[in-house]
Image (tube, grey):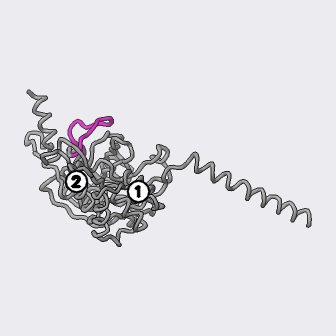
């Protein structure tokens, strides 16, 4: 018995010695972010973006992601505590010559929120030929639903889904009529198209910085995609990429098993390529983002001969190619 107790004590001490070493190894070799909860409210997002755009030509340009990261660190990620006065106090400091680095140097989690929100929002604001402003600096992302087409939505991220197996809903449903043009929120490359038993006809688009993977699902039966769109193509924010439908919930292709027509849009954050297809994917709520993007909707035109819709940019290219 004494020998057994002595052996147990030895193994316990050995485990205690090894554990810190393993922890350090993981920190050194596997240090990318593995969890993000995006709780930024629409009002906080709008205020931060407005501060960024309005200061774009000033000496002290205010970056909206820095603002949100500061607030995230201040609130512990819980934006239900958001007060516009907190944002104003921060922007006043920056405009009076303080740097975001000096302001946040004692905020333990600022770096984490900075990386997390950059992954979620990088490129939403900036210079783009599609911006309808004199300086071309403004919103670069678009609502997923084309201009003049109605839809309804509510916060359904995390709701229960049972087809196949019980699981949380890792996206945002936007209820719209079949055939409603679906718009690329941001520019990127088409990584996947085709049938998925859960999402039906779907499109996956990777952002240029490769940190965001946009997933558009339940597209229209028979003609789900924009004309000639294929995997590997680069799309521009504001382009028509497909059409709302109700396909999915079937292992058989091109089946309408969704009761109500809608667009399922999801956003996966990718900090390391190993996360892309894994058991630890990071999907975030899009409710605040899609609500905010209501102010930037892509105008589309219908070609009556083909019944296809085109953004202004796509229509211009189409006309040039037919001359």
Residue 159 against residue 313 in the figure, above or below: below
Specify whether residue 91 is painted magenta: no
In what element is the residue under mark 1? helix
Q: Is residue 188 visible?
A: yes
Mark 2: few/some/many CA within 10 Å (<14, 14-19, 20+): some
| Magenta region, residue range | 223-237
Residue highlighted by disc 1:
102
Which residue lies at the image location 30% right of the left edge and 55% below the top edge?
A: 64
Specify whether residue 229 is painted magenta: yes
Which residue lies at the image location 46% right of the left edge and 53% below the top edge?
A: 281
- Where does the image place residue 228, in percent across and percent down from the top left? 23, 35
Residue 208 against residue 294 in the figure, above or below: above
- Rendering quarter of residue 101: bottom left
Q: Are marks 2 and 1 in contact (CB under 8 Å)?
A: no
* On-image quarter of the N terminus: bottom right
* Residue that protrudes farthest toward the right in the picture: 2
Is 200 situated left or right of 16 in this image? Answer: left
In what element is the residue under mark 2? loop
Q: Which mark is residue 55?
A: 2
* Residue that protrudes farthest toward the top in the picture: 323
Q: Which secondary structure type mostly characterizes the magenta part of the structure?
A: loop
In front: mark 2 or mark 1? Answer: 1
Q: Which mark is residue 252?
A: none
- Where does the image place residue 132, in percent across and percent down from the top left? 13, 48
Q: How far apart are labels 2 and 1 at the CA level?
A: 20 Å
- Where does the image place residue 174, in percent across and percent down from the top left? 25, 60
Instruction: Work out whether mark 2 precedes mark 1 in sequence or the reverse, and give the earlier one.
Output: 2
Which residue lies at the image location 18% right of the left edge and 41% below the top edge?
A: 129
Seen from the viewer's position, the closer of residues 151 and 142 is 142
């Amino acid at each position: 018995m004494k020998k057994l107790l002595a052996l147990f004590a030895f193994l316990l001490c050995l485990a205690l010695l090894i554990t810190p070493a393993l922890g350090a190894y993981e920190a050194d070799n596997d240090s990318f972010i593995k969890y993000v909860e995006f709780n930024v409210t629409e009002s906080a997002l709008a205020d931060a973006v407005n501060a960024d755009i309005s200061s774009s030509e000033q000496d002290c340009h205010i970056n909206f992601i820095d603002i949100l990261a500061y607030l995230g660190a201040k609130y512990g990620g819980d934006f239900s505590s958001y007060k516009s006065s907190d944002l104003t106090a921060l922007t006043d400091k920056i405009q009076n010559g303080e740097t975001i680095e000096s302001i946040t140097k004692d905020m333990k989690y600022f770096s984490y929120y900075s990386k997390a929100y950059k992954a979620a929002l990088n490129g939403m604001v900036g210079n783009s030929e599609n911006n309808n402003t004199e300086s071309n600096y403004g919103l670069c992302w678009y609502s997923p639903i084309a201009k003049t087409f109605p839809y309804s939505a509510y916060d359904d991220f995390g709701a229960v889904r049972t087809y196949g197996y019980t699981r949380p809903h890792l996206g945002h449903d936007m209820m719209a009529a079949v055939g409603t043009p679906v718009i690329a929120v941001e520019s990127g490359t088409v990584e996947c198209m085709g049938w998925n038993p859960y999402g039906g006809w779907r499109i996956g688009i990777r952002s240029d910085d490769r940190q965001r993977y946009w997933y558009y699902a339940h597209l229209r039966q028979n003609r789900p995609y924009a004309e000639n769109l294929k995997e590997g193509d680069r799309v521009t924010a504001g382009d028509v990429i497909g059409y709302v439908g109700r396909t999915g919930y079937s292992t058989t292709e091109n089946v309408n098993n969704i009761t109500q027509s809608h667009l399922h849009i999801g956003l996966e954050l990718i900090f390391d390529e190993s996360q892309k297809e894994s058991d630890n994917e990071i999907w975030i709520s899009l409710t605040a983002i899609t609500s905010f993007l209501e102010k930037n909707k892509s105008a589309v035109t219908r070609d009556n001969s083909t019944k296809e819709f085109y953004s202004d940019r796509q229509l211009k290219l189409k006309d040039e190619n037919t001359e």
